[in-house]
Image (cartoon, rainbow, N blue to C red):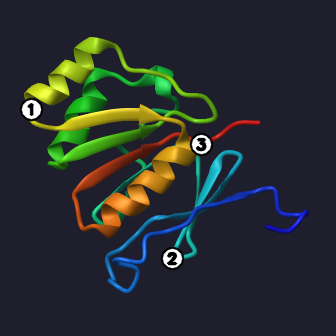
Amino acid sequence: MSQNDESQHIGTSNLRKEDEGFLAVKKYDVNKFTLIDGETYEGAIALYKGKVYTDIMPASFDEITETHFRKWLSLKPEMILIGTGSSHFFLKPEPVAYFYSKGVGIETMRTDSACRTYSVISGEMRNGLAILFPITE
């Protein structure tokens, strides 16, 4: 990374890069994500099976509601990774138990970690849903 480039570059899995449907975060910056296909998105995004979703996302982690949980589950992921931004925040135990009762694992972590983890999971052709909130300054 050059001294003038403040964005964070993410390593991507080599397992599936050549597949047409593979999609992961190449780099992130304050309030935006650049994907490996070159597309840039501002604000929160969701990645699942080679598609980007913005319509199933709250503006911030604090605004997640049960409605969002139902939308995420309607995609039928095996697991959900929530990138909480610059800091790590946790879900309350009730939503975590709800997802586990549906057979879906759910984890929260900082967004940089979620981007890397999603790259590996999708590279292994697993059905992970990444819910990514942007970093802030």
Residue farthest to the bottom? 18
- Figure quadrant of residue 134: top right
Q: What element carries label 1?
A: loop
Question: Which residue reaches farthest right?
Answer: 3
Q: Is residue 30 above or below residue 94?
A: below
Query: Residue 39, percent across and down?
Result: 56, 70
Residue 35 vertical placement versus 94 (above, below): below
Q: Residue at x 24, y 13 (%)?
A: 94
- Identity of the residue drawn at 54% across and 37% down: 110
| Residue 66: image tag | none
Total marks shown come to 3
User: Counting other residues with Cα less than 10 Å from the Cα at mark 3, is it few (<14), some (14-19), or many (20 or more)?
Assistant: many
What residue is disc 2 on?
37
Disc 3 element: loop
Q: Who's the residue at 24% across and 67% down the image?
A: 125
* Label 2 packing within 10 angstroms: few (<14), some (14-19), many (20+): few
Residue type at mark 1 is Lys
Distance between mark 3 and mark 1 Cα atoms:
27 Å
In-front residue for pair 37/59: 37
The residue under the point 28% across, 67% down is 124
**Quick check: 60 left or right of 53?**
right
Give the x, y percent position of residue 92: 34, 13
- In which quarter of the view is residue 98 placed? top left
Q: Using the image as rendered, state which of residue 128 and residue 71 is in the foreground.
A: 128
As shown in the figure, which amino acid type bears the numbered disc 3?
Pro
Q: Would you place residue 129 above or below residue 72 in this image?
A: below
Identify the residue position indicated by label 3 in the image. Answer: 134
Instruction: Give the labeled residue for mark 1.
Output: 102
Q: Between tags 3 and 1, which lies in front?
A: 1
Tag in front: 2 or 1:
1
Instruction: State which tag comes first along the sequence, 3 or 2.
Output: 2
